[in-house]
Image (cartoon, rainbow, N blue to C red):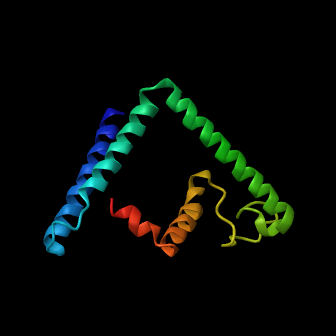
Amino acid sequence: MRLYNFVSFAGIFILLIIAWLMSRFLFGNKDIINWHLICWGIGLQLLFALFIFIVPVGITLFQAINDLAIIVLSVASDGAKFVFGNLAAPPGSEGSLGFILAFPPSSSSQLWWPSSTIITYCLLSFGNLQNCSQG
């Protein structure tokens, strides 16, 4: 497991080097990358990793958040089945009409993409995302 952890940790810096090389040689400007923002992002990732893997309460807290998200998803799925009937049934289940794009897949790993898209759209609409990314 240690090799996989090292590969994941090194991947952050490899992607950072690729981004720097692209900004330097492809765009011809080394000042495109906001280093202050990148250092904050990597620092927060490391703090979360230390909190989850080192502090015993960390994994318990994030497991509780995960369990809560799964409960919210199952309640939303039950509500969709109540309102829409077989249209909300997951593909491959009995009575399903196939994949309907209006309903997200039932996997809990894909919970956050619709909400992050909506948040990003709202921030872009009100001009706040540009202010956030300027550091």
| Closer-to-camera residue (121/15) | 121
Residue 21 location (% of width, % of height): 17, 64
Residue 3 location (% of width, % of height): 30, 37
Residue at 65%, 47% in the rendered image? 69
| Quadrant of residue 130 within the rendered picture | bottom left
Q: Judge whether 107 appears above or below 122 on screen.
A: above
Q: Is residue 22 left or right of residue 133?
A: left
Q: Is residue 10 left or right of residue 69?
A: left
> Which image quarter holds the C terminus?
bottom left
Q: Is residue 5 left or right of residue 125?
A: left
Residue 23 location (% of width, % of height): 19, 68
The total of numbered circles placed on residues is 0
Residue 47 location (% of width, % of height): 38, 37
Residue at 72%, 70% in the rendered image? 98
Residue at 18%, 66% in the rendered image? 31
| Closer-to-camera residue (62/108) | 62
Q: Is residue 19 left or right of residue 106?
A: left
> Which image quarter holds the N terminus?
top left
| Closer-to-camera residue (43/104) | 43
| Quadrant of residue 112 within the rendered picture | bottom right
Residue at 54%, 62% in the rendered image? 116
